[in-house]
Amino acid sequence: MNRFRICFVCTGNICRSPMAETVLRSLADDAGLGDRVEVTSAGTGDWHVGEGADPRTVEALERRGYDGSRHRAKQFEADDFARYDLVVAFDRGQERILRAWAGDDADRSKVQLLLTFAPDAAPTGGGLDVPDPYYSDAGLFDEVLDMVERACSALFRQIEPALRKGQS
């Protein structure tokens, strides 16, 4: 069985990308398609490798009924492109880094900004970048989770027909 493989990539893999990983996995599981999609996350940097998600991330997820407690941060490597069908970045800085790490046009084409799936979820005046809540307060974690939920729902709606077709 071929699974659609997605990796969400933020800076340190403790805030935004674990949120998206948790939300998209929950959407797939709730639709009965969890076995058809592999959802993971990573960071462009190695500062937090092996650590759990930021406690504010875990708390924001828990307030919405998600469990992000088992997350362990890892770093995205150029070799990882071969493993994934889609590599989702949260801001233009990560998008640039990932595209620079890509070995060819096929790998570069796998890199997409999360908010391209739901541009209406973008912060006012913020373009398509999801703000990094790390240096902010818990309120921004909730705002980021709002954006992540809307964009992941839109992403899931795009891939769901192919996942369902793969079931038959």
Image (cartoon, helix red, strand yellow):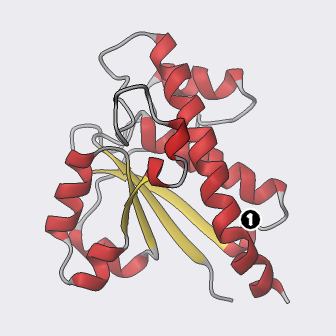
Relative to 47, does residue 77 appear above or below in the rendering?
below
Relative placement, left or right, of 60 versus 30 is left
x then y, percent, for residue 29: 78, 57
Q: Residue at x 32, y 72 (%)?
A: 80
Q: Nearer the viewer, residue 86 or 48?
A: 86
Q: Residue at x 79, y 78 (%)?
A: 164
Relative to 18, does residue 69 appear above or below in the rendering?
above
Q: Nearer the viewer, residue 6 or 128?
A: 128
Relative to 148, does residue 7 appear above or below in the rendering?
below
In this rendering, does residue 55 appear at all? yes
Residue at the spot of label 1: 34
x then y, percent, for residue 5: 53, 72
Disc 1 packing (10 Å; few <14; some 14–19; many ≥20): some
Q: Secondary structure at mark 1?
A: helix
Relative placement, left or right, of 11 versus 145 is left
Q: Nearer the viewer, residue 124 or 28?
A: 124
Q: Residue at x 69, y 89 (%)?
A: 1
Quarter of the view holding residue 81: bottom left
Numbered-mark total = 1
Quadrant (top left, top right, bottom left, bottom right) of the C terminus: bottom right
Q: Nearer the viewer, residue 144 or 135?
A: 144
Q: Residue at x 59, y 22 (%)?
A: 60
x then y, percent, for residue 155: 60, 58
Outermost left residue? 100
Amino acid on which disc 1 is placed: Gly
Relative to 163, does residue 69 appear above or below in the rendering?
above
Quarter of the view holding residue 51: top left
In this rendering, does residue 45 appear at all? no
x then y, percent, for residue 158: 65, 66
Quarter of the view holding residue 31: bottom right
